[in-house]
Amino acid sequence: MDEVLKNLSSVSWWVGVVLVGLAINLIAAYLKPRLDGTLSSVSKRWATKSAVRRGEREARIRALIASEHEQLLNRTEELRLRVRSFGYCFQAIVLMLAALWLILGDSWGTSWGTLLTSVTRFFECCRTGRRKLLGLNPALPEIPKRSAHDLLLELTGIDLSRCPSCKHGTMIVVAEL
């Protein structure tokens, strides 16, 4: 089990998984049209199915071009699918955390707070690993404390201590909120 956790916290393992996934996706995208063409020439049934799908796609495109209502329906459907995929991702994360908690129970403690702390540490390790890969110091840089007045002056060039009308007179602080 320590080996699995070591792999999961390794940046190189995650990079490898992402690269293999992208490679499989690209290969599938390039092979599908050729596979359709090859199987269409071999199988009459496959050729018929490919022609029907092509016709349905072209009809759908013509309908979308012709009608704003169809475009709105298509956008709504796309939004619905994106919200659903977000929900599935959230469920997957919750189920993964529950499975890890059940598997590692005693080593992670018995409370969800301990589990969340461990997950936070895992992502912290991933973040510091990314910073090391980029040649940066693993510790986050200190952000200097500045007042809102100084920040507004730096970002917008507006000096709150100057009169908004003439820009020469100095404003006096009467009260702070």
Image (cartoon, rainbow, N blue to C red):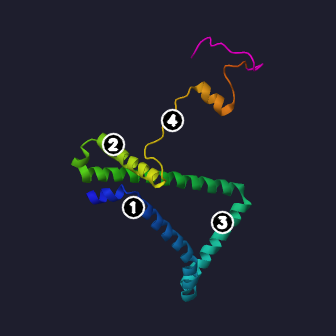
In the figure, 74 relative to 124: above or below? below
Helix, strand or loop status at disc 2 = helix
Residue 138 is situated, as x and y percent measured from the top left of the image, at: 43, 47
The quarter of the rendered structure image containing the N terminus is bottom left
The quarter of the rendered structure image containing the C terminus is top right
Prevailing SS of the magenta stretch: loop
> As rendered, which of 83 and 167 lies closer to the eye?
167
Residue 161 is situated, as x and y percent measured from the top left of the image, at: 67, 19
- Residue occupying the point 57% across, 80% down: 34
Q: Residue furthest left?
A: 106
Question: Quarter-wise, where is residue 165 in the image?
Answer: top right
Q: Amino acid at mark 1?
A: Trp
Please state which of the two labelled residues, at mark 1 or mark 4, is closer to the viewer.
Answer: 4
Figure disc tally = 4
Q: Amino acid at mark 2?
A: Thr
Residue 12 is situated, as x and y percent measured from the top left of the image, at: 41, 60
The label shown at residue 143 is 4
- Residue occupying the point 58% across, 87% down: 41
Q: Amino acid at mark 4?
A: Ile
Q: Amino acid at mark 3?
A: Arg
Horizontal arrangement in the rendering, residue 115 relative to residue 172 (left or right): left
- Residue occupying the point 45% across, 47% down: 137
Q: Is residue 138 magenta?
A: no
Tag 1–tag 3 contact (CB < 8 Å): no
Magenta span: 164-177
Residue marked by disc 2: 117
The label shown at residue 60 is 3
Please state which of the two labelled residues, at mark 3 or mark 4, is closer to the viewer.
Answer: 4
Residue marked by disc 1: 13
In the figure, 57 relative to 129: above or below? below
Please state which of the two labelled residues, at mark 2 or mark 4, is closer to the viewer.
Answer: 4
Label 1 or label 3, whichever comes before in sequence order:
1
